[in-house]
Amino acid sequence: MVFEDLILPMEGGHLPFKQGTFETHVGNAAMEKFGKPKWKNWVSQAIAHFNHCFQPDQIVLGGGNSKLLDTFPSNCRLGSNKNAITGGFRLWEKPYKY
């Protein structure tokens, strides 16, 4: 997470969610085990929780299955692994705090 000039490293997927973590409910294994409809619902709930807790300007959704989503909130967009390297280099363009 980036807040102004501060980079906050976090593993949001490891936060508690239902009877596990976000990762256990929105990952590929969950989609295969419980099916796409339930998985899509959990992704929607996870986005709502992140929006409520962190109040971000935008959320970038990534991962191979994110392209399976039909809709998401206005402050969400799909990302691409192609952008990861560019984004990583941008972190060096100005002095961020860690």
Image: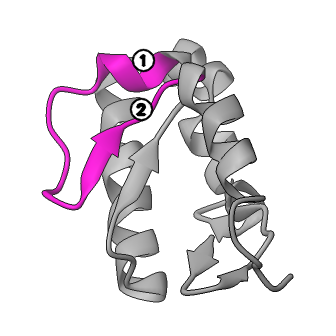
Residue 38 picture quarter: top left
For the residues labelled 1 and 2, the Cα–Cα distance comes to 6 Å
Indicate whether 80 appears above or below 5: above
Quadrant containing the N terminus is bottom right
Q: Is residue 66 magenta?
A: yes
Residue at image point 40% right, 45% down: 43
Q: Residue 17: x and y, percent?
A: 60, 64
Instruction: Say which element carries label 1.
Output: loop
Q: Nearer the viewer, residue 82 or 19?
A: 82
Indicate whether 20 appears above or below 85: below
* Magenta residue span: 65-81
Q: Residue 65: x and y, percent?
A: 47, 19
Do the residues under discs 1 and 2 have CB atoms within 8 angstroms? yes
Q: Residue 81: x and y, percent?
A: 59, 23
Q: Is residue 15 magenta?
A: no
Q: Neighbour class for label 1 at 10 Å: few (<14), some, many (≥20)?
A: few
User: Which residue was labeled with disc 2?
Assistant: 39
Indicate whether 40 appears above or below 6: above
Q: Neighbour class for label 2 at 10 Å: few (<14), some, many (≥20)?
A: many
Indicate whether 14 appears above or below 98: above
Q: Say if residue 63 shows up in the picture.
A: no
54 vs 29, left or right, is left
Q: Say if residue 53 shows up in the picture.
A: yes
Residue at image point 62% right, 54% down: 22
Residue at image point 41% right, 32% down: 39
Q: Nearer the viewer, residue 56 or 22?
A: 56
Q: Amino acid at mark 2?
A: Trp
Q: Nearer the viewer, residue 31 or 19?
A: 31
User: Which residue was labeled with disc 1?
Assistant: 35
18 vs 73, left or right, is right
